[in-house]
Image (spheres, helix red, strand yellow):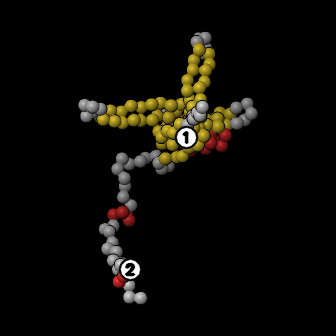
Amino acid sequence: MASLNKVLLIGNLTRDPQLSYTPSQTPVVDFGLAVNRRWTGQDGVQKEDTCFVDCRAFGRQAETISKYLTKGRAVFIEGRLTYETWTAQDGSKRSKHRVTVESFQFLGGPGDQQPKEAVQTEEQKLPPVDMPQVPPDDDIPF
């Protein structure tokens, strides 16, 4: 039987990434991601839901995420789900799913101050130019 473990998320960091190192000195970064979902209910009212996801990256990606991403920044994450279990200090069994990052892309600008409405460039503000009409092939004199 075939199986697939693939996660694609676009969201904003909920906290600054926390960089640490394994005993073998492999960089590891942990961060939280908030993924929003908006929809219109049957009553016509706009609704919103936020899903909070813990993420972890290793190696060079961990160092890059730690260096360039901060709380509030938008990012596209591609990864896989991992399931972790542990025993808490009070002796209770705990578990959670986490996304292990396989690749990512920065979204937005350096400050991630994306305006709600697109800003037009100077070229987009210019009126359209009338292009000369090209005659059909049968009207070409040669």
Q: Which residue lies furthest to the bottom in this view?
A: 142
Q: What is the distance, in whole Å, between disc 1 and disc 2 at their CAs?
A: 50 Å
Q: Which residue is drawn at 68% across and 33% down?
A: 21
142 to 50, vertically: above or below: below
Q: In this view, does 65 lie above or below 117?
A: above
- The first of marks 1 and 2 along the sequence is 1
Mark 1 crowdedness (10 Å alpha carbons): few <14, some 14-19, many ≥20: some
In the shown orientation, is residue 124 left or right of residue 63?
left
Which residue in the protein does label 2 denote?
A: 137
Q: Answer with left or right where residue 12 lies relative to residue 44.
A: right
Residue wearing tag 1: 78
Q: Which amino acid does label 2 sit on?
A: Asp
At 62% from the left and 42% from the top, the residue drawn is: 61
For the N terminus, give its image quadrant. top right
Q: Where is residue 90 in the image (x, y as percent from the top left)?
A: 59, 11
Q: Position of residue 73 (x, y in %)?
A: 48, 42
Question: What residue occupies the far top of the structure in this picture?
Answer: 91
Name the disc covering residue 127, or none: none
Q: How crowded is mark 2: few (under 14 residues within 10 Å), some or many (20 or more)?
A: few
Residue 59 visible in the snapshot:
yes
